[in-house]
Image: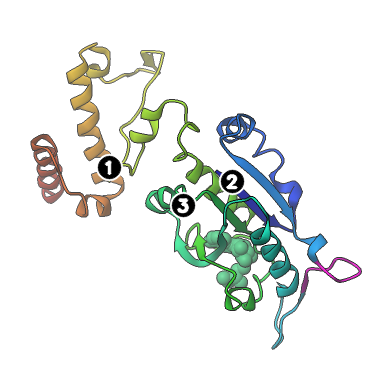
Amino acid sequence: MRFDLVTIFPGYFASPLGEALVGKAIESGLLEVRVVDLRPFSEDPHRKVDDEAFGGGPGMVLAAPPLVAALEALRAEEGAAAPHVVVLSPRGRRLDAALARELALRPRLVLVCGRYEGIDERVREAGLVDEEVSLGDFVLSGGEVAALALLEAVSRFVPGVVGEEDSVRLDSFEDGLLDHPHYTRPREFRGLAVPEPLLSGHHERIRRWRREQQFEQTARHRPDLLDRFAPRTPEDRELLDRVARRGRTP
Ligand code: SAH
């Protein structure tokens, strides 16, 4: 899968793209990530890409001409898959696991990082934007961190990027529930013991304990997820029932 990151701060991505899972996926060719510096697309002699807002007010706006030129160049690239263009923006669709999974089906994403007050609305009006995505209801100073979050969340769904296929399947949100808690050595730490079922060596007990904990954690931290959860097994029905009843007793 290919990502093109359009930014006025190309240096921003050097270390995150060189490390850990994403770094390895790039090295092995599972992901191809190109950082596209917006400035060379500016016709201005000083490579200026921003300007004052019409109507006045504080803050600059990323101008339409360089961005449109960059997006058109990316779309016109020969031999490359047609890009799905995503602008990172607080007004976009909130990023979640479902959206990440959906975007992972695209062969190529172009992620446009805004800066300052945002980008000239005519980039969207000109029909060059397929989708806007937000990280949440807060304002970042630029789209770079949001683009990295999106890239990392999406790439977990690209086959092979996460080594143990199971670890994605078992992650939070995959089946509508949060993950269960995890423990590692030492067995006892500051008087705190590891829950007994995990030490039992009994696979079925461990599985049941973890499943129950998923319901427990979801009820405690994200009751909104439980409202939407549709149990598919008798065990899940029983566990859902149990946490629901517990929730109702004060
Ligand atoms: N004036 C805008 C904020 C601009 S912040 C507003 O109030 O909505 C500058 C850039 O940061 C944006 O263009 C966008 O690319 C990025 N950004 C800020 N907050 C974001 C968020 N929650 N999700 C995704 N991108 C965000």
Nearer the camera: disc 2 or disc 1:
2
Residue 180, percent from left and from top: 30, 33
Earlier in the chain: of badge 2 and badge 3, it is 2
Extreme front residue here? 79
In which image quadrant can residue 203 be found?
top left
Q: Nearer the viewer, residue 74 or 59?
A: 74
> Which element type, helix, strand or loop, lies under badge 2?
strand
Residue 215, percent from left and from top: 22, 39
At x 52% / y 48%, what residue is drawn? 107
At x 39% / y 29%, what residue is drawn? 165
Q: Which residue is mark 3?
A: 103
Q: Is mark 3 within 8 Å of ligand 1?
A: no
Q: Which residue is mark 1?
A: 175
At x 56% / y 51%, what residue is drawn? 108
Q: CA distance from mark 3 to mark 1?
A: 18 Å
Q: CA distance from mark 2 to mark 3?
A: 11 Å
What label sits on residue 9 in the rendered view?
none
Given the image, on which type of amino acid does mark 3 rest?
Leu
Whether residue 44 sits left or right of residue 176 in the image: it is right
Residue 74, percent from left and from top: 67, 58
Whether residue 62 sits left or right of residue 25 in the image: it is right
Magenta-colored stretch includes residue 48: yes
Q: CA distance from mark 2 to mark 1?
A: 27 Å
Instruction: Report if the CB atoms under discs 2 and 3 are less than 8 Å apart.
Output: no
Residue 95, percent from left and from top: 45, 55
> Which element type, helix, strand or loop, lies under badge 1?
loop
Tell me if residue 149 comes above or below residue 90 in the rendering: above
Given the image, on which type of amino acid does mark 1 rest?
Asp
Given the image, on which type of amino acid does mark 2 rest?
Arg
Q: Which residue is mark 2?
A: 2
